[in-house]
Amino acid sequence: MNSLHGVVRWPVDTVAVAAVGSSGVLVGNHGPQEQPFRLASVTKLLSAYAVLLAAQEGAVDLDQPAGPPGATVRHLLAHASGLAFDDTQVVTAPGVKRIYSNSGFVVLAEVVASCSGIAFADYLTEGVLRPLGMSASRLVGSAAAGAVSSCADLARFAAELQAPKLLAPQLLIEATQVTYPGLDGVLPGYGMEHPNDWALGFELRGRKNPHWTGTRNSPETFGHFGQSGTFLWVDPVAGAACIALTDRDFGPWAHTTWPSFSDAVLAELL
């Protein structure tokens, strides 16, 4: 794919990108595919998948109490629990506002570990990473932002997100639909969104503008970006997924390069 080679113009030292088709087949890549990168908040996609797997296996229930009074596992996954961004302060009642919360994912990891009797990093490794062949991936910090992975591994994960083998397809569909519709909130790096649509761990593009995905991406696009200069999106309408990992932290450079890159990838695929 010629569009993938456009990353040579990005203001980064190292970048690895890949595109995956709807059947889970890799359709192109560029850069060091096996090199591990810090994922930052793209970690949340892997952690959310482990929580969903725990729900499927009956270790947890999406509607069981977790976090602040009145909140549930579902609230935590959807950043609607009322927890603050990076501490245990309760800012508002559950289901009132979309408050992006690293703390919520720390709580989710604790819930899975407590209910399953398995450390969360081990649950993620044995339940998600190893079955998908993601041998370069591991959780070395928090469930919110502490994973490292390679582009090749995330391409395998993107294939799972398009043609699931670990999760029941219906559960994945539920997990990628708007949860608690209509909630306003801040999208980190972009400001207040009305509404700030989110699913169960997956951010939804919706009608957000500006956004880190492209103008060609459908509103149904789901994924996440990380402050370490990383992103993964899946566009179920286009039948495509895209991964980008870099060694430069997110900033103004990403605001301009990422959307145009995504548009170029979609234009070539379609």
Image (spheres, rainbow, N blue to C red):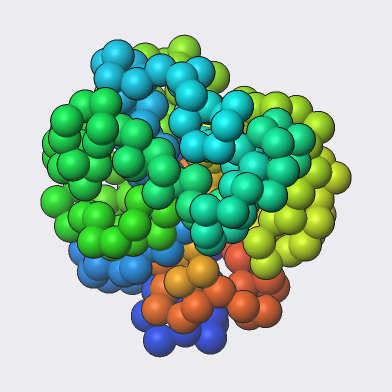
Q: Position of residue 253 (x, y in %)?
A: 63, 79
* Residue 212 place in picture, x, y as percent: 65, 59
Where is residue 64 drawn, in percent x and y?
Answer: 46, 19
**Whether residue 30 can be seen here:** no
Left or right side of 82 for 168:
left
At 32% from the left and 25% from the top, the residue drawn is: 53
* Residue under the image location 40 percent in, 86 percent down: 13
Q: Is residue 140 above or below residue 53?
A: below
Which residue is more in the foreground, 37 or 105?
105
The quadrant holding residue 114 is top left
The image quadrant of residue 265 is bottom right
The answer, for residue 228, to whether it is visible in the render is yes
* Residue in front for this viewpoint, 110 or 247: 110
Residue 125 x, y percent position in the rendering: 18, 42
Q: Is residue 46 left or right of residue 36?
A: right
Q: Quadrant of the C terminus?
A: top right
Q: Quadrant of the N terminus?
A: bottom left
